[in-house]
Amino acid sequence: MRSHPVVGVPVPRSSRRLALALLCALAVAALVPASAWAVEGGLRCEEMTFPVTLSANDATVYNVFGVLCSQGSLEHKTVQITIHGITYSHLYWDWPFQPEKYSYLRRATAAGYGVLNLDRIGIGKSDHPPAEAVTIESNGYVIHQI
């Protein structure tokens, strides 16, 4: 197992619709090989990939990378989905420098939440489609699928 720094801050409970969508995404992600690791204190993280398309009219499948973390089991926990801005990756929410101070993911999981930390399509460990295909609309469509 490899260790991974993680932090987080509480966020309001998500709706049932969002929870159902996340549950479906996690079921799909379970079919894709992933790696998992644990950190001292009970933090468990698992890398996942989510197959998505950029629009309803484009059948090309791309993969979005994410890390799902929690303290212990995810059962009965609200799962927060974190999405970075344009100039970062999933590291925005799990900053490796002084993670005990700067990692939102660690704080949120310590507060009892699960966190699904994503790399947006075209960034980080997610697939990189042609730049002109990655728009505000395609980003919204991708996140909606997850």
Image (spheres, helix red, strand yellow):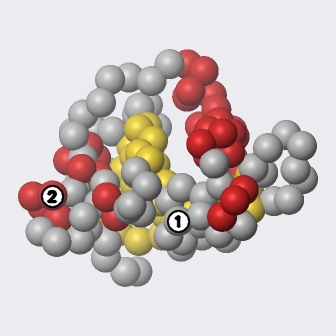
Q: Nearer the viewer, mark 2 or mark 1?
A: 1
Q: Quadrant of residue 45?
A: bottom left
State how far apart marks 2 and 1 are (Cα).
21 Å
Mark 2: amino acid? Tyr
The residue drawn where x is 43% and y is 55% is 86
* Residue 56 % position (x, y): 85, 40
| 85, 112: nearer the viewer | 85
Question: Does residue 49 sit above or below 15 in this rendering?
Answer: below
Asked if residue 107 can be seen in this view, the reply is yes
Q: Quadrant of residue 108?
A: top left
Q: Quadrant of residue 141?
A: top right
Disc 2 to disc 1: CB gap under 8 Å: no
**Drawn side of residue 105 relative to residue 31, left or right:** left
The residue wearing badge 2 is 102
* Residue 117 % position (x, y): 43, 53
| 133, 141: nearer the viewer | 133
Few, some or many residues within 10 Å of mark 1 (<14, 14–19, 20+): some
The residue wearing badge 1 is 123
Asked if residue 117 can be seen in this view, the reply is no
Count of labels in the image = 2
Secondary-structure class at tag 1 = loop
| 127, 110: nearer the viewer | 127
**Drawn side of residue 110 relative to residue 48, left or right:** left
| 117, 33: nearer the viewer | 117
